[in-house]
Amino acid sequence: MELAERVKRGEEWLLVHGASSYMDNLSRALNITPKYVMSPGGFKSRFVNSSDLELFRAASSLFSIQLVSSFGQQGINAVPLYPPDNISAIARRKDALRAVENGKVRLIRGNCSGFITSFKNKDIFTLWDLGRFLSCLLWPAMRQGRAS
């Protein structure tokens, strides 16, 4: 794993990840049919509503555990950051998604995705000072410190 080699050379990294394939696998195992939407630009994404959030949390946690284990096998001391217990990444939720349905562009509300706007660096730097590589899993977008 190239990232492990870079960390061994002294680089400090924060790995921010999602868990789409893990979420797809859990959905299949639980017989849940995911909803996908297509943006006007042709980008396909999973629509995650409030009832999908626990599934996302489980999938992200499984993936984070695998990452930490994989890095540990390579001699890297990785630490997962589990929001909402550790709010390191602050994100803004998209109020609505533009999606193409039946050839028409529609606004779809109720999606819980968003994008990172900032990080709380103090906690990250503290762990780096302890010699830890960080694996930060994404969680639903946060608005003013609360899940939105």
Image (spheres, rainbow, N blue to C red):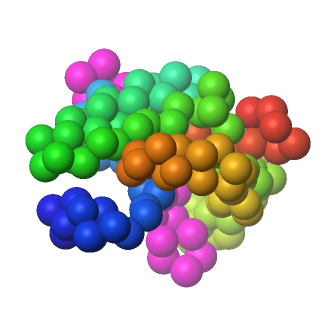
Q: Which residue lies furthest to the front in this view?
A: 130
Q: Residue furthest bottom?
A: 41
Asked if one can make out residue 135 in the rendered structure from this viewpoint, the answer is no
Which residue is most to the right? 144
Q: Residue at x 60, y 53 (%)?
A: 125
- Residue drawn 59% across and 76% down? 40
Percent of width and height locating residue 18: 43, 49
Compared to residue 30, the image places residue 131 above or below, namely below
Residue 96 in the image: above or below residue 123? below
Return the x and y of residue 120 as percentages of the image width and height. 71, 51
Residue 48: x and y in percent read 56, 40
- Quick one: 72 or 98, which is closer to the camera? 72
89 on left or right of 137: right
Check the image and report above or below for 54 versus 97.
Answer: above
State the residue at coordinates (76%, 54%): 92
Q: In which quarter of the image is the C terminus?
A: top right
Decide which of 143, 52 is in the foreground and name it: 143
Residue 100: name its quadrant. Answer: bottom right
In the image, what residue occupies the spot 82% across and 37% down?
A: 145
Is 5 one of the magenta-colored residues?
no
Query: What is the quadrant of the N terminus in the image?
Result: bottom left
Q: 30 or 15, which lies in front?
A: 15
Is 82 on the left or on the right of 122, as rendered? left
Farthest left residue? 73
What are the residue bounds of the magenta stretch?
A: 27-49
Q: In this view, does 135 lie to the left or right of 39?
A: left
Q: Can residue 109 be seen in this view?
A: yes
Instruction: Estimate the x, y position of residue 102 in percent, counting from the top left.
Output: 55, 63
